[in-house]
């Protein structure tokens, strides 16, 4: 190692994005680069001069690379404070060469455990030990050492180094990012262990660990929250699954707002419920329209016609790539769409949506290719001073357990509509009532304090279309009044969980009005 060199960097990374250019920039600034294993080989292949850590420490990499940087000459070079007498003496006595810069990121643990079929030994081998140790050491000693943990920091660091040593403010920023990285990394590991290991018998459920430390990374700062006086930001999981909103890509339109993101997530959840072409129209996280059909255009037109007044300024969800025929219908005069989420967009459809309507440059087009993948996940809801945690209500519906409880069983056509209405109803705010007919939502009563009020609203929205329709209720009818109201509107079949003390009264009301009714045995409250 050259005694003439005054600037030295330790480089050991898993993610090598932009690394060759960054290391070349360091070399041009007079840095000597020390490195390990695969990083050393990568840099040498890029034509850079690299000193292997084992040559510096005098100790070889052992145990298939498990031990390579865990050495006093490495951590002494990171943690040393050359302007303190004791540290300076130890540096001189042991031949330690202080680092000005530590460039390190970690084994891809989250990506590894997210892979289908990954084994426990594979996951264990992707738990980085030396990396977090070096990062934490450098972050602790940030008064003397710069710690670089992300490729997007490279340009800023190089620009600063060209003027001399990194300034104190930048070193603090880098240290904060470093501790954030190791905290998220440890959280991911702890969460994975919690997911595979049985907990103590005293714990209620192995799915809910004794200590919960969720970790999310900020993707963007939003203009504001639900209202302009509320600040807001969008955070995502470290490795979001393909079927999630966090994995979707924005192809067009204005910046997404807090409310847009909530509505898009609702549209995504409902659209993936169906195997046939489906479209859903969302307002304030509730579906004001939804339709299924043999073609996407027909499904959209059914969904939009469910409540055209509410559909103005809505969010749309599709479970098929958007085609040109549907896009033409979307672009008809008088329609205004805030955002769309779909698995993709045909070239002609994308051209139409971004050039033809008045809102062309504003409509937010979101692409989520894997949106049909079901994502079993955990829901978090904050309360003052705490967090509520539950499984997401997205399990497969046990249709085989549904029971016909009235004198008349639903016809085949009614059964199809009941299945459709039930899938939509689970996504409506409680107390939820959905009226549907012919694969189309025609009336929704959402978020009312009384189920009867929700029935009134749904029937009002449906109007004359309710004749021959079906009704879905997310929870049981406690009294017959909801069924009587549905009968007045012309409803012919009903679906509900059952389980009320008033079930017999409700069944009697159905029989008196020749309404067929199914009990599902499963409730879908959505607060």
Image: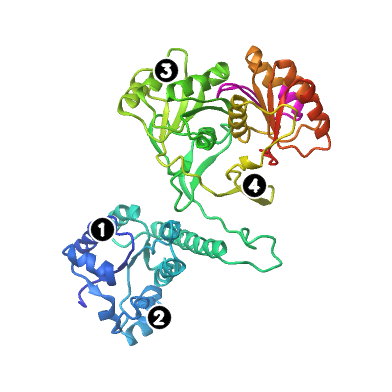
In the rendered image of this protein, does residue 315 appear above or below residue 144? Answer: above
* Mark 4 residue crowding within 10 angstroms, few (<14) / some (14–19) / many (20+): few
Quickly name the residue at label 3.
329
Give the magenta part as a residue range: 434-455
**Quadrant holding the C terminus:** top right
**Decide: marks 2, 4 in contact (CB < 8 A)?**
no
Is disc 1 placed on a helix, strand or loop?
A: helix
Q: Nearer the viewer, residue 413 or 80?
A: 413
Q: Name which of mark 2 and mark 3 comes first in the sequence.
A: 2
Query: Mark on residue 22?
Result: 1
Q: Name which of mark 1 and mark 4 comes first in the sequence.
A: 1
Task: Nearest to the eye among marks 3 and 4: give it.
Answer: 3
Task: Nearest to the eye among marks 1 and 2: give it.
Answer: 1
Q: Nearer the viewer, residue 197 or 1?
A: 197
Does the magenta portion include 33? no
Task: Nearest to the eye among marks 2 and 3: give it.
Answer: 3
Q: Name which of mark 1 and mark 2 comes first in the sequence.
A: 1
Q: Could you say where residue 498 lies in the image, as x and y percent from the top left?
A: 75, 37
Query: Mark on residue 87?
Result: 2
Marks 1 and 4, how far apart at CA: 42 Å
């Amino acid at each position: 190692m050259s005694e003439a060199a005054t600037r030295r960097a330790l480089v050991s990374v898993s993610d090598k994005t932009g690394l060759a250019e960054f290391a070349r920039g360091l070399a041009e600034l007079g840095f000597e680069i020390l490195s390990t294993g695969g990083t050393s080989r990568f840099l040498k292949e890029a034509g850079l001069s690299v000193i292997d850590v084992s040559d510096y420490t005098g100790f070889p990499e052992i145990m298939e690379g498990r031990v390579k940087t865990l050495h006093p000459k490495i951590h002494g070079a990171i943690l040393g404070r050359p302007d303190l007498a004791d540290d300076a003496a130890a540096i001189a006595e042991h031949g330690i060469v202080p680092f000005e810069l530590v460039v390190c990121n970690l084994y891809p643990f989250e990506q590894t455990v997210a892979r289908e079929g990954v084994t426990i030994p594979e996951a264990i081998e992707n738990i980085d030990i030396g990396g977090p140790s070096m990062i934490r050491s450098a972050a602790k000693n940030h008064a003397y050492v710069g710690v670089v943990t992300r490729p997007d920091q490279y340009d800023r660091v190089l620009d600063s180094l060209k003027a001399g040593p990194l300034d104190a403010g930048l070193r603090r920023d880098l240290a904060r990012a470093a501790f954030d990285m190791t905290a998220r990394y440890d959280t991911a590991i702890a969460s994975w262990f919690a997911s595979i290991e049985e907990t103590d018998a005293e714990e209620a459920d192995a799915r809910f660990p004794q200590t919960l430390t969720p970790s999310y990374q900020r993707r963007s700062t939003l203009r504001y929250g639900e209202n302009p006086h509320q600040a807001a930001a969008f955070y995502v999981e470290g490795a979001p699954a393909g079927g999630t909103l966090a994995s979707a890509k924005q192809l067009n339109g204005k910046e997404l707002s807090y409310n847009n993101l909530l509505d898009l997530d609702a549209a995504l959840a409902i659209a993936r419920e169906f195997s046939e072409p489906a479209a859903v129209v969302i307002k304030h996280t509730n579906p004001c329209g939804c339709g299924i059909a043999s073609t996407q255009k027909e499904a959209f037109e059914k969904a939009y016609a469910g409540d055209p007044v509410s559909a103005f300024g809505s969010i749309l969800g599709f479970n098929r790539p958007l085609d040109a025929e549907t896009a033409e219908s979307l672009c008809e005069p008088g329609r205004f769409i805030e955002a769309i989420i779909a698995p993709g967009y045909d070239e002609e459809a994308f051209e139409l949506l971004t050039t033809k309507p008045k809102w062309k440059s504003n409509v937010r087009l979101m692409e989520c290719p894997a949106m049909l993948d079901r994502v079993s996940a955990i829901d978090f809801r904050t309360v003052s001073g705490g967090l509520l945690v539950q499984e997401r209500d997205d399990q497969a519906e046990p249709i085989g357990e549904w029971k016909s409880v009235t004198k008349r069983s639903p016809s085949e056509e009614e059964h199809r509509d009941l299945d459709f209405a039930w899938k939509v109803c689970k996504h409506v705010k409680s107390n939820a009532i959905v009226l549907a007919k012919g694969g189309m939502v025609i009336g929704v009563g959402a978020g009312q304090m009384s189920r009867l009020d929700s029935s009134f609203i749904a029937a009002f929205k449906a109007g004359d279309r309710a004749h021959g329709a079906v009704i879905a209720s997310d929870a049981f009818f406690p009294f017959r009044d909801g069924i009587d109201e549905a009968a007045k509107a012309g409803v012919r079949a009903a679906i509900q969980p059952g389980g009320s003390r008033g079930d017999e009264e409700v069944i009697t009301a159905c029989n008196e009005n020749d309404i067929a009714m199914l009990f599902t045995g499963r409730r879908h409250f959505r607060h």
